[in-house]
Image: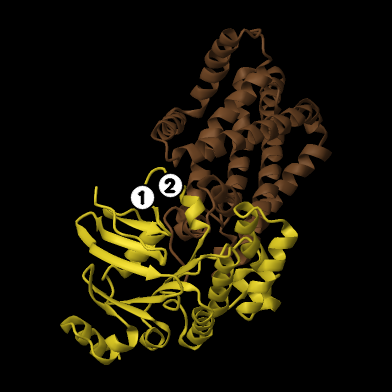
Amino acid sequence: MVEQPAIGDNDRVVVHRLSKRFGNVQAVADVNLRVRVGEAMVIVGPSGSGKSTVLRCMNHLEVPTKGAIYIDGVHLEDPKTDINAVRKEMGMVFQQFNLFPHLTVMGNLTLAQKRVRRRSQKEAEEIGMQQLNRVGIPEKARMKPAQLSGGQQQRVAIARSLAMNPKVMLFDEPTSALDPEMINEVLDVMRELAASGMTMVVVTHEMGFAREIGSHLVMMDEGRVVEEGNAAEVFANPQNERTRAFFSKIL
Amino acid sequence: MRPVQVPGAAAIETDPLGIEASQERGEFPYWLVLMLLIIGLFAYLTFFDPTYVGARRAILPGLGITIRATLIAFVIALVIGLIAGLGRIARNSVVRTLATTYVEFIRGVPMLVLIFAVALVIVPLLADALGFSNRLPQEVRAIIALALIYGGYIAEVFRAGVESVHPGQLEASRSLGMPHSSAMRHVVIPQAVRNVLPALGNDFISMLKDSSLLSVLGVTEITQQARIFASSTFQFREGFLVLTFLYLTMTLVLSLLVAWLGRRLKRG
């Protein structure tokens, strides 16, 4: 058992000495991160650098091999922790959207509100409609996900998470499965979210976006954090050799 | 969105009659025309030829029992199959082991042997143990046998159905804070059932045909009626032609329904 880290009132997510192995592959090796309230952390790095695994550990979709995750001070890996209670305060947006295809857009937005937040149908629909307005597609409420474009589906997925009133939003490469012309409509929603003060952790390949909204940039390579700091400073003056090499390839 | 390949999805047959495949090849389904001619001829003989009157009158009364036994057994088999199918993929290893043993046991023994075993050994033993009368009617025993056997087959259909639902669906529901049971009930199982409807339809057709095996227990469904009629009158041709006509009509109608359902579901 690892020693408990110091956790301040302002620390929404603390990743403490996190390691994750898949068979013989060391996906994540001894990663420490801190996401403060209202901060937008952007994690970048080459494919296979372990950034998605770190994000998935934050919501217990992957169970760490070693180390610990604390959400608002609650230890996720503690067997006594009610994981559903923690998860209802966190939104997660996936690369493949993962909308429920058998439900309408509104059905997608209201299911967890009713089952988890115990809201009435009427209340859930009202909140669902607010969130659809926020992502700019209120007119799609009665459609099935398959009738929407990829960008619209991802915006519905974001609205679905927001309808739960989360304290932190996790984004796992939210634009990687989209056609280029649809990327911006999703990034616009995320920009608005960051500007509104939502605490966010974003794994992405969109460097322009990372530079623009990331208050805190984390560069990962081979399962480790190789550099982190204020996004503007890291972009302007990367200290680490591998960060420089990565930026020169991508930018 | 890119289509996602999921293991198990291939096991779910959606075009059993090959109608879609033949349409894609631009072929007219001539087999269907021939089949309708054969059924038409059999229907004419059954209903209008005077030499078939005896066979028709002897066999038709069994039709009600065939349909009733199949319907009741199928409903019970659906319940058993859903429970056993979910048991096959349960996280609890005891449940998983029990469900797998049941399914593999059923799949490893010929249906005829199972029908004898269930109706003549297992049901009397259970009735004894539970203090019921041992004199359950043969039709009830036969229905229990069919339901237990098809419960094992349908369990595999449901398992494949659940595995055909993309794992991201469960992850998305869990990430919204839904407990595992609630995510299964509201997100995974509705999609799984939809995916396996055509396969379940095919199992219903198989069961209708396999209900003929109940004749070995003396249940007076159509096959038993035909056997009695043929052996007492020596009108084998008449007896078995009427019998074949009845099965073929029912299965063809059902197969076309299943094929139509499969195409409708595919279109979404």
Q: Residue furthest left?
A: A241
Numbered label attached to residue A77: 1
In-front residue for pair B77/A108: A108
Give coordinates of residue A46: x percent, y percent: 27, 77
Q: Amino acid at mark 2?
A: Thr
Q: CA distance from mark 1 to mark 2?
A: 7 Å
Whether residue A23 is situated above or below residue B88 in the rendered picture: below
Q: Secondary structure at mark 2?
A: loop
Residue at the image point whose x is 66% and y is 78% from the top = A133
Residue at the image point whose x is 44% and y is 27% from the top = B109
Identify the colour of chain B in the image. brown
Q: Secondary structure at mark 1?
A: loop
Q: Amino acid at mark 1?
A: Glu
Instruction: Count all numbered tags in the image, as a single digit.
Output: 2
Chain shown in yellow = A
* Residue located beneath label 2 in the image: A81
In-front residue for pair B56/B166: B166
Give coordinates of residue B122: x percent, y percent: 53, 16
Whether residue A82 is situated above or below residue A127 in the rendered picture: above
In-front residue for pair A117/B243: A117
Q: Is residue B221 left or right of residue A44?
A: right
Q: How is the image coloured?
A: by chain
**Residue B165 appears in the figure:** no
Q: Is residue A21 left or right of residue A110?
A: left
Give coordinates of residue A69: x percent, y percent: 35, 57
